[in-house]
Amino acid sequence: MKIYLIRHGQTTGDVENRYGGSYDDDLSNEGEVQAQELADKLSNSGIQSIFCSPLKRAQQTAGIINAKLNCDIKTIEDLKERNQNGILSGMIRDEAKTKYPELVEQVKDYKNTIEGAESYENFVERIKKIFTEIAGSANYSTIGIVTHGGPIRVIFREILKDREIDIADCAYAVIDKEEQKLILEKLDGIEYKTD
């Protein structure tokens, strides 16, 4: 089975410089363009089904891709982004820095858990479990998973046992699953960190 692991496009929260996570924002105009460009790239991918986060930015990206592919979209709650930012989620970063300077410092380390946030450990377990379920139960030769930067980083770090990555909007990786083995075949918009 081939798995296309896809990040959503740029969001209105990105443009407004807001803390993300569970903040449920829409794609920006640029994000819609990015998703359309990605749909064009994936038009001959053979994706038969899309598994998608319930958050609007992922749903909108999947919808744009699906306009080219014409397959079914399954919304999967556990593919949503981690609420790493807790009570900061959705706040404009400059306002948060003034109102909650200590919390702003704490969220710089993704393993920290602040008030209202999902713990890193719970997030990792959630993503590992749902990725394994999807990869193990899908009766397709090629699937797409439309999700967020956090889940994709966890899949690279914890499942593929790979290095830390930077991931652009509408970036994707192609993973080939042969029995119990996962082989990374292609990266588009994903780069390994060098530090």
Image (spheres, rainbow, N blue to C red):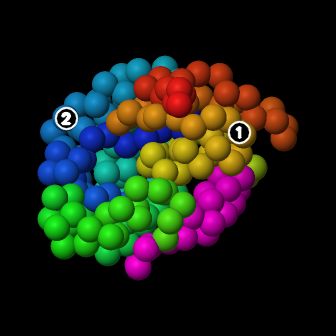
Cα distance between the residues tagged 2 and 1: 31 Å
Q: Residue at x 37, y 50 (%)?
A: 58
Q: Is residue 135 left or right of residue 42?
A: right
Which of the numbered marks, if any, corresponds to residue 79? none
Please name the residue that numbered disc 2 is placed on: 30
Report which quarter residue 130 is drawn in.
Answer: bottom right
Residue 72, image x and y in percent? 48, 47
| Element type at mark 2 | helix
Q: Main secondary structure of the magenta part?
A: helix
Chain part drawn in magenta: 114-134
Label 1 packing within 10 angstroms: few (<14), some (14-19), many (20+) = some
Q: Residue at x 40, y 56 (%)?
A: 108
Q: Is residue 80 above or below residue 86?
A: above
Q: Nearer the viewer, residue 126 or 98?
A: 98
Label 2 packing within 10 angstroms: few (<14), some (14-19), many (20+) = some
Q: Is residue 151 left or right of residue 178?
A: left
Q: Amino acid at mark 1?
A: Leu
Please name the residue that numbered disc 1 is placed on: 160
Q: Nearer the viewer, residue 139 or 41?
A: 41
Single out the residue that lies furthest toward the right: 179
In the rendered image, which quarter contains the N terminus? top right
Magenta stretch: includes residue 39: no
Residue 185 visible here: yes
Q: Residue at x 57, y 37 (%)?
A: 164
Magenta stretch: includes residue 131: yes
Q: Is residue 112 above or below residue 31?
A: below
Q: Is residue 8 above or below residue 13?
A: above
Report which quarter residue 120 is drawn in.
Answer: bottom right
